Image: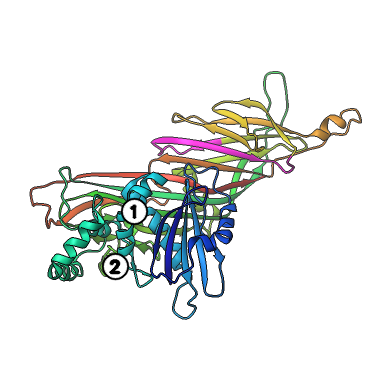
Amino acid sequence: MIEAIYIADVSHTLVFEYCNSLLLPKYKSILPKIANINVNETSVESQKDYSSPMKITINSGYYVVGYNHQSLHIYVLCSEDKTTSNPLIPYTFILRFVETLEDYFDELTRSKIEANTDVITLILYQMLDDGMPYITDFNKIRDLVSHTSLLSKIINEASKTTGLQSDAKQSFTTDIPWRRNDARHTNNEMYVDIIETVNVILKPIVAKSKLQQYDSAFYSSKTDNQVDNYVLSGSIDGQIDFFSQLSGAPTLELSLNKIGANLELPRFHRCINSDLFRERRGVLSFIPPEGKSTLMKYQIDLNELQRNREKTSLLKLSTIDVQFLVQPNSSEFEIKLFPANMITKIDFIKVEIVCQEPDEQVKVNRISHGDFQTRLSGKHEWSLKDLKKGVVPTISATINGQEDEENEQSEVELHRQPSYIKLSYSHKGPVPSGLKVDSLLVVNAKGLGENTKPYKGVKYTTKSGEYIVRS
């Protein structure tokens, strides 16, 4: 059960406090223990300063879940209740609470928290009911708590008209919880984003060319070997994001192609009519949430495909294929990238070269496109942007170590090779699964108007997750 919420600044000075009882432990009494919660390292690569929630036990009756967000520390004091309470509730609630505050005040700072303590108190009053999460939808909270509301005005209004207050509660039960009441927009629009993330582990298989290999001053045939990738493991994680600004509470139908009709075990937003989806596979019927939301998530397991050619064809035809060739009896290697012809725009490509030993360095022999950098952390990275169609970016490099210089005199040559390479990329164009939107229709224009035609847009994006090619 959630008993109290504390918000402190970087120096652990209390900025905001919300308690259910006066008998709870005070912030100063638990500060020596919860201060240690900040040793958790935040993500350096992320643009925002986030960390994962952590649990600190205060005593046999209470524990604290803490979360570092930008320049603020947020703590949720909970009482031990092993019989009825879900242990994940405080972790989920603290993340939802931070998202709600960002929805109200954008970037969170100490000055904003101090200037809006009354609004934050009212937000928590709606989000919690007897220590348990109650209303957590952004749009419904915005209907109940005005951004510019003052606590004194709310109390005075409630004391004057108790009858109206009960009517408001009764009308709320009939409302759509994920949508604001009486939503009105001048420009009605809706956008669909289909995003798929490719996770694969590949092993190159080198087929030697039948041509006789030779070297000369003008031509070298030692890299003419054919390389085919064998998929050791792979999956495609997808999601359908939706952004809407529509007046009223219209009912929409999003129709997918045959790929969408055959997806196994998709996970839906609660606005989706799942019964209708079972009857009409591939059709999502819903009253959209206000703003951004994720309508559906799904996963395609590439390991279920029997032939390796079927797995690799998904990469070659719709995303970025890679050829990673390590020269035999040498420390040289070559990487070639093959963007699919269906890609309309490449946002970025990064190839991280991971060596076997931390002291090994990568020396570039030839690079056709992009830039190569060795960062202070020891990461070797090849970065590319704004590639044109038909271009095959190539990099040829050698791995050197400190022992190589010592062994030059003894004429002992060490053959080094990368442990693996990791691809990171994002591009626009058809997604690897082949999922597409066939239509997006307004089937019930309640509050929108029969003559109103919203603007529609669809975008397809493919990203890499764990895209690893072993040597």
> Can residue 309 be found in the magenta stretch?
no
The magenta segment is 337-358
Would you say 357 lies left or right of 34 here? Answer: right
The amino acid type found where label 1 is placed reads: Thr
**Disc number placed over residue 274 in the picture, else none:** 2
Which amino acid, mark 2?
Answer: Ser
Question: In the displayed image of the protein, which residue is found farthest to the top?
Answer: 217
Q: Residue furthest right?
A: 410
Q: Locate residue 410: give its quadrant.
A: top right
Residue at image position (38%, 58%) is 97
Q: Earlier in the sequence, mark 1 or mark 2?
A: 1
Instruction: Provide residue 120's location: percent of width, then percent of height.
Output: 33, 56
Residue 448 visible, this angle:
yes
Whole-number angstrom distance, CA of label 1 to CA of label 2: 40 Å
Q: Quadrant of residue 93?
A: bottom left
Relative to 51, does residue 399 appear above or below in the rendering?
above
Between 110 and 453, the residue placed more toward the observer is: 110
Q: x%, y% of residue 56?
A: 56, 64
- Farthest-out residue, bottom: 83
**Where does label 1 land, which residue?**
117
Q: Is residue 128 above or below residue 69?
A: below
Residue 57 bears which disc, if any? Answer: none
Instruction: State left or right for residue 327 relative to residue 384.
Output: right
Q: Position of residue 86 (x, y in %)?
A: 45, 73
Instruction: Name the one closer to the observer, 356 or 66.
Output: 66
At horizontal 31% and vertical 64% (from top left) the residue drawn is 125
Residue closest to the eye, 258 or 186: 186
Q: Nearer the viewer, mark 1 or mark 2?
A: 1
355 lies left or right of 433: right
Q: Is residue 357 magenta?
A: yes
Q: Position of residue 301 (x, y in %)?
A: 49, 59
User: Which type of secondary structure does the marked residue at label 1 adopt?
Assistant: helix
